[in-house]
Amino acid sequence: MQILKLGGKTLPFMKLRKFAMTLSTLLILASFVSFFTKGLNFGLDFTGGTAVEVGFTQAPDLKEVRDAITESGFEDFSVQLFGSSKEILVRLAPQGAGVKAEVIGNQIITALQKVESTVEMRRIEFVGPSVGEDLKEQGGLAMLTALICILIYVAFRFEWRFAVGAVSALLHDVIITLGLFSVLGLEFDLTILAAILAVIGYSLNDTIVVSDRIRENFRKVRIDDTIEIIDISLTQTLNRTLVTSITTILVLIALFGWGGQTIHGFATALLFGVFIGTYSSVYVASAVAIAMGVSKEDLIPEVIEKEGADLDPMP
């Protein structure tokens, strides 16, 4: 039976598992330190505030737009292209109780008339702080529910040690990706939350493929060494993992470079998430399962029992 694909050699992935787990632990600790010291830069979706979309007849200079808004007395805001080079979206933090969105919108239009006199307001939206808090809470519950459902599914489909490894890998990916946004101070909004959930799905897909191959090799390969079987399984799935990851990364690089400011954060989260998800499906999920003592007997108990029954003396 042919079980190897890279020149007949098995790559010793698990030989580096202690180094990988140490690196992952350090990254997770660094992420938590950043959470407690800097926190996440929550966007308008979570903090509340006002969004004003305006249109120009000519593509404006975003630096001039920002300077004009700053001169009008606004401090906590963001400016980005929206839809085309002639339309921008201005996001402003809450301006205090009793300040109406229409008043803020008129102030923004007045400020931007210094850049172009024919600037036009397209729409204005206000998100209350209570709505932002609800979105933040529901977003956290969505991620927690996804992880619990994944834990139950993998435990039922494979084995509970693999389920713990899979969920550990997913938590690893989410925490480190959030840590990146915290360290860099990037804005975290509903778009980024959607990217985090997509990262969970991508990482889980890789982990399931690896776990399925490990289970298959436990049954087929006549080797009792768990680490060697896992190395064989990871080597066999490496081609598929690399092809999937590289093609996905190429698309995300295009989105990151030319997709515009609107999806820049989304592309950043997915680009980093795909990289860290591929790493965790190889090292974190399998290393956790090994640390918890997974073995061939755990995945094929019915085969062991049947073989044991065949050895019983006939009456």
Image (spheres, rainbow, N blue to C red):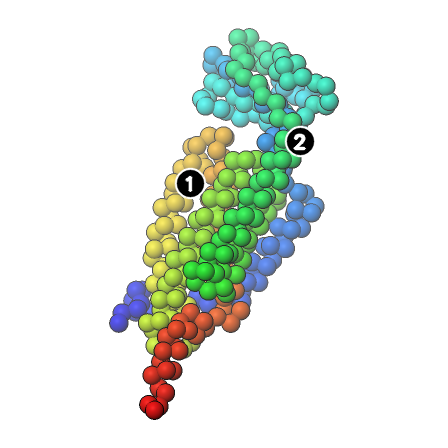
In the rendered image, the quadrant that contains the N terminus is bottom left
Residue drawn where x is 37% and y is 75% of the image: 303
Local crowd size for mark 1, using a 10 Å CA cut-off: few (<14), some (14–19), many (≥20): many
Q: Is residue 218 visible to the viewer in this orientation of the structure?
A: yes
> Residue 252 has which mark?
1
Local crowd size for mark 2, using a 10 Å CA cut-off: few (<14), some (14–19), many (≥20): few
In the image: residue 169, left or right of residue 247 = right
Of the residues shown, which amino acid type is indicated by label 1?
A: Leu
Res. 234 image quadrant: bottom left
Q: Position of residue 130 (x, y in %)?
A: 66, 31
Residue drawn where x is 57% and y is 40% of the image: 139
Residue at the right extreme of this rendering: 97
Residue at the left extreme of this rendering: 1
In the picture of the structure, the residue carrying the numbered disc 2 is 130
Q: Is residue 187 visible to the viewer in this orientation of the structure?
A: no
Check disc 1 and report its element: helix, strand or loop: helix
Query: Where is 156 relative to 255, above or below?
Result: below
Check disc 2 and report its element: helix, strand or loop: helix
Of residues 269 and 220, which is closer to you in this image?
Answer: 220
Query: Where is 305 relative to 284, above or below?
Result: below
Residue drawn where x is 50% and y is 30% of the image: 261
In the image: residue 97, left or right of residue 157 = right
Between circles 1 and 2, the one closer to the viewer is 2
